[in-house]
C-alpha cells in the first residue's frame, strides 16, 4: 500500500513541484538508451515514464497510488504510456528490455514477501538478458539521522514541507512528512523504508534468477546510495 503522500490528491499534485530537479533519473535514462521497452515499477506521477515515451520507448508504468496515476495520466503525452493501477503482481504478460524502480520505490517495499513477489514478477516481465535497475540507500551512512525539520525544511510555491524521524527498528526506518499549504491546510503522511545491506540485496537477486552485473554510486547522492543493475538469467 502506498502512503498518503502519494494517495492524497493534493499531495500527489504537489509531488513534482516538491521534487524539483530530477537529475536523479539521469542514470535510468542512460540505462534505457538502447531499450525499446521499459517497465517502470512505482512510476508515481510518471516523470520518467513520459521522458522515455518522448524518446519513442514503449513504456508501462505501474503504481498502487491512484492519485499519482491521475496526475500522470493528465500530463501531455500520457496516452503513449500504458498505466496500470497496482503493483508488480498486477502486470499483464510482457517481455521488456529494462525494468526500473527509481527513488524510494525499492525501499518502500518493506515486507519480505512483497519484496520477493516484486523481484519475481519483474523477472517474469523481462526478456531473457533484460535488466532490472533500482537504487537503495547505504545503511551504514545512517541518512535518517538528518531527517528532521531543521535539515529537511523547504518552501516551494508557498507550501512548507519537512520530514521528522519517528522510529528506527532494525532495518526499518519510519518518518513523518508534513506539508502546510498557503490556505492553512496541514497534511501529514507516515512512511517506512527498509534499509537493506548490499549483500542482502545481491542474495535476493540471485535467488530470483538474476546476475548482479553492476553496483554503482548514485550521482546525486555519492557514497550514500547503491544503484543495482541485474540481468535476467533464467526462467523461474
Image (cartoon, helix red, strand yellow):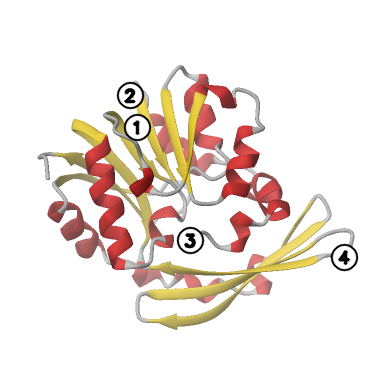
Q: Nearer the viewer, mark 3 or mark 4?
A: 3
Residue at 66% from the left image edge and 50% from the top image edge: 12
Tag 1 near tag 2, CB within 8 Å: yes
Q: Nearer the viewer, mark 2 or mark 3?
A: 3
| 104 lies above or below 41 | below
| Local SS, label 2 | loop
| 178 lies above or below 32 | below
Tag 2 near tag 4, CB within 8 Å: no
Q: Write down the quadrant of residue 180 in the picture.
A: bottom right
- Label 2, label 4: how far apart the Cα atoms are: 45 Å
Q: Earlier in the sequence, mark 3 or mark 4?
A: 3
Residue at 44% from the left image edge and 46% from the top image edge: 102
Side of 236 where 35 appears, left or right = right
| Local SS, label 3 | loop
Tag 1 near tag 3, CB within 8 Å: no
Q: Write down the quadrant of residue 236 in the picture.
A: top left
Q: Residue furthest top?
A: 56
| 20 lies above or below 38 | below
Side of 186 where 75 appears, left or right = left
The location of residue 13, given as percent across then percent down, is 70, 47
Q: Write down the quadrant of residue 198 in the picture.
A: bottom left
| Local SS, label 1 | helix
- Label 1, label 2: how far apart the Cα atoms are: 8 Å
Residue at 44% from the left image edge and 81% from the top image edge: 168
Q: Earlier in the sequence, mark 2 or mark 3?
A: 3
Side of 230 where 191 appears, left or right = right
- Label 3, label 4: how far apart the Cα atoms are: 28 Å
**Residue on which disc 1 sits:** 31
**Residue on which disc 4 sits:** 184
**Residue on which disc 2 sits:** 35
Q: Nearer the viewer, mark 1 or mark 3?
A: 3
Amino acid at each position: 500500500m502506498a502512503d498518503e503522500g502519494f494517495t492524497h490528491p493534493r499531495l500527489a499534485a504537489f509531488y513534482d513541484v516538491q521534487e524539483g530537479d530530477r537529475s536523479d533519473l539521469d542514470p535510468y535514462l542512460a540505462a534505457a538508451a538502447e531499450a525499446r521497452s521499459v517497465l517502470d515499477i512505482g512510476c508515481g506521477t510518471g516523470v520518467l515514464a513520459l521522458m522515455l515515451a518522448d524518446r519513442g520507448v514503449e513504456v508501462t508504468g505501474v503504481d498502487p497510488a491512484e492519485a499519482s496515476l491521475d496526475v500522470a495520466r493528465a500530463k501531455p503525452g500520457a496516452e503513449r504510456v500504458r498505466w496500470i493501477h497496482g503493483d508488480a503482481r498486477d502486470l499483464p504478460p510482457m517481455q521488456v528490455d529494462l525494468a526500473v524502480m527509481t527513488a524510494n520505490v525499492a525501499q518502500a517495499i518493506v515486507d519480505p514477501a512483497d519484496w520477493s513477489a516484486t523481484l519475481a514478477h519483474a523477472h517474469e516481465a523481462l526478456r531473457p538478458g533484460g535488466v532490472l535497475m533500482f537504487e537503495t540507500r547505504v545503511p551504514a551512512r545512517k541518512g535518517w539521522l538528518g531527517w528532521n525539520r531543521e535539515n529537511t525544511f523547504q518552501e516551494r510555491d508557498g507550501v512548507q514541507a519537512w520530514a521528522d524521524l519517528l522510529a528506527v527498528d532494525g532495518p526499518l526506518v519510519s518518518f513523518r512528512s508534513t506539508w502546510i499549504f498557503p490556505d492553512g491546510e496541514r497534511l501529514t503522511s507516515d512512511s517506512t523504508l527498509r534499509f537493506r545491506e548490499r549483500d542482502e540485496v545481491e542474495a535476493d537477486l540471485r535467488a530470483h534468477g538474476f546476475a548482479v552485473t553492476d553496483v554503482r554510486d548514485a550521482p546525486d547522492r555519492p557514497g550514500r546510495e547503491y544503484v543495482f543493475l541485474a540481468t535476467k538469467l533464467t526462467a523461474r
